Image (tube, rainbow, N blue to C red):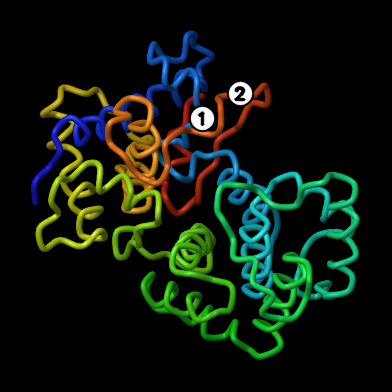
Amino acid sequence: MIVRQEIFDTYWYLAAERQHIFFNKIRGVTPLTTDPIFLTYKFCNTYRASDRVSQFLIKKVIYSGNFDGKDLLLRILLFRLLNKNETWTALEEKIGTVTFSNFDFGTYRKALKAIKEECGVLYGNAFILCANKVFGYEKKYENHLALLEKIFEENIYINILASKSLRELFNNLKLLPLIGNFMAYQIAIDLNYSPLFDFDEDDFTMAGPGAIRGINKCFKNKGAMSNEEIIMFMVENQDKEFNRLGLDFRNLWGRKLKAIDAQGLFCETDKYARVRFPELKSNRVSIKTKYQPQSLRIDYFYPPKWGVNEKIRL
């Protein structure tokens, strides 16, 4: 493989600087950064689990009660399909705690219809979800509810919960209607945050469209390596590369970058390069979302099995 050195180095700079911003936000340090691109545009966190939506998922969806396997599967699937904190909050205000025992297509459809009419938007915009009318309904949320109904009525959930590896979990999710490769990977990671599974996030990865654009900018030639092998190369060489560039990378309270984080960083590198290196053409030429400071403070909480929460000093 042949790297495009300036962009490859930018990948590592972005990882370190975005994590630097993360800790500055926690401490209330201003300015957050001197980088005008970071000050102007919105970028995801270096660690996926630190992003606002993932934090909501971990705290409010997964670890907010004592849920059994079917409850957790339903809650995680429905939340990630909607991908919007405000929609989840509004839904539970209308129907109570989302559980398998109270899941009913008609009740949930009525509630989501009302939320849509009240708020205008049901879905988050982080992922582009398939809007296929595979179940015959006009509304996307109706087809997603029908998907959930199918998973439990046809006992598909049994195979999902019996997955023995991250790859197998991904493969079981990929078999579902409306779920493509990238979404199956994202949901697999979400499920792995929960007590249902405890797979190493480095056991399997899947490059999304944004990550592939970033990889193509970082490498002139990938040689015989797949996109997924490139992602694992970044994971395996992170210490070496931070040291080579003299970057002071503070990890997540002892947790190094995992494959899901390295994958996401390629996507963020693609975004950053649109402004910093506009001569590198791709099918995306600008960054749509501007940075808007959030006044709501996040009390960070991670899957307890990671052993991170005990080390957090805010």
Q: Residue at x 17, y 45 (%)?
A: 219
- 295 left or right of 58 in image: right
Q: Position of residue 265 (x, y in %)?
A: 35, 42
Q: Position of residue 74 (x, y in %)?
A: 67, 69
User: What amino acid type should be assigned to the residue bearing mark 2?
Assistant: Gln
Q: Residue at x 62, y 62 (%)?
A: 76
Nearer to me, 247 or 122: 122
Q: Residue at x 13, y 34 (%)?
A: 5
Q: SS for tag 1? A: loop
Mark 2 closeness class: few <14, some 14–19, many ≥20 residues within 10 Å = few
- 221 left or right of 116 in image: left
Numbered tag placed on residue 73 in the rendering: none
Q: Position of residue 57 (x, y in %)?
A: 61, 51
Mark 1 closeness class: few <14, some 14–19, many ≥20 residues within 10 Å = some
Q: What residue is disc 2 on?
A: 292
Cα distance between the residues tagged 1 and 2? 7 Å
Q: Position of residue 127 (x, y in %)?
A: 55, 53
User: What amino acid type should be assigned to the residue bearing mark 1?
Assistant: Lys
Number of numbered discs present?
A: 2
Q: Residue at x 40, y 36 (%)?
A: 271
The quadrant where residue 141 appears: bottom right
Q: Is residue 290 above or below residue 81?
A: above
Nearer to me, 242 or 64: 242
Q: SS for tag 2? A: loop
Dot 1 or dot 2, earlier in sequence: 1
Q: What residue is disc 1 on?
A: 42
Proximity of marks 1 and 2: CB atoms separated by less than 8 Å:
yes
